[in-house]
Amino acid sequence: MYTSKIKNGATLTIYRDESETMFAGWAFSIVSDKGQRSGFIDDLSDLFKLIKRTHPENLDGLPVFDRRAPENTYGVWTWDDTHMIVGDCPSSLDAVRRPDSILPSYR
């Protein structure tokens, strides 16, 4: 499970949702003094959009979408089989193609 404060003072939690065993996957919850919002994270693209929208303070512990790590993980926060989320901080993140990917790009 991943938890971080986000730009508006709310708390972002990303967790493995196994409530439906056939459709287990990643989900998120944002809790603030205004209420709660939640949804599913189907892939790295969804996670990237969520991070860019919420600007979490901490990026350590984000879920990964492929067991095979990139050869070099310096500056890499998470990955799937074709792309990585890289950058120094939440405001400078980018989704880039993995140099070791043999699959077509989704960008």
Image: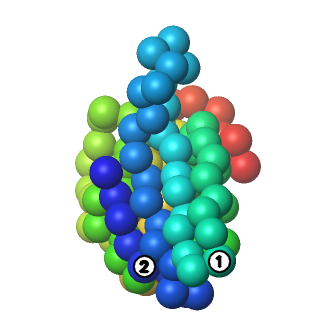
Instruction: Label 2: state its secondary structure.
Output: strand
Q: How is the image coloured?
A: rainbow
| Residue at (61, 53) in percent of width and height | 38
State yes or no: discs 1 and 2 in contact (Cβ < 8 Å). no
Q: According to the image, label 2 marks what residue? A: 5
Query: Which residue is painted at 58% across and 44% down in the image?
Result: 41
Viewer-nearest residue: 24 or 106? 24
For the residue pair 55 and 28, the one nearer the viewer reads as: 28
- Residue furthest out toward the right: 107
Measured as percent of width and height from the top left, residue 44 is found at: 55, 47
Residue 58 % position (x, y): 35, 76
Name the residue type under label 1: Lys
Q: Earlier in the sequence, mark 1 or mark 2?
A: 2
Q: Is label 1 in a helix, a strand or a loop? A: loop
Task: From this view, report whether residue 12 is shown above or below residue 24.
Answer: below
Q: Is residue 92 visible?
A: no
Residue sitting at x 64%, y 33%: 104
Q: Characterize the local packing of mark 2: few (<14), some (14-19) or many (20 or more) Cα atoms within 10 angstroms.
A: some
Q: In this view, does 88 lie to the left or right of 36?
A: left
- Above or below, 13 against 23 in this view is below
Query: Which numbered disc, 1 or 2, marks the residue closer to the eye?
Result: 1
Residue ID for mark 1: 34
Q: Residue at the spot x=48%, y=61% of the render?
A: 85
Observer able to see residue 38:
yes
Give amino acid for label 2. Lys
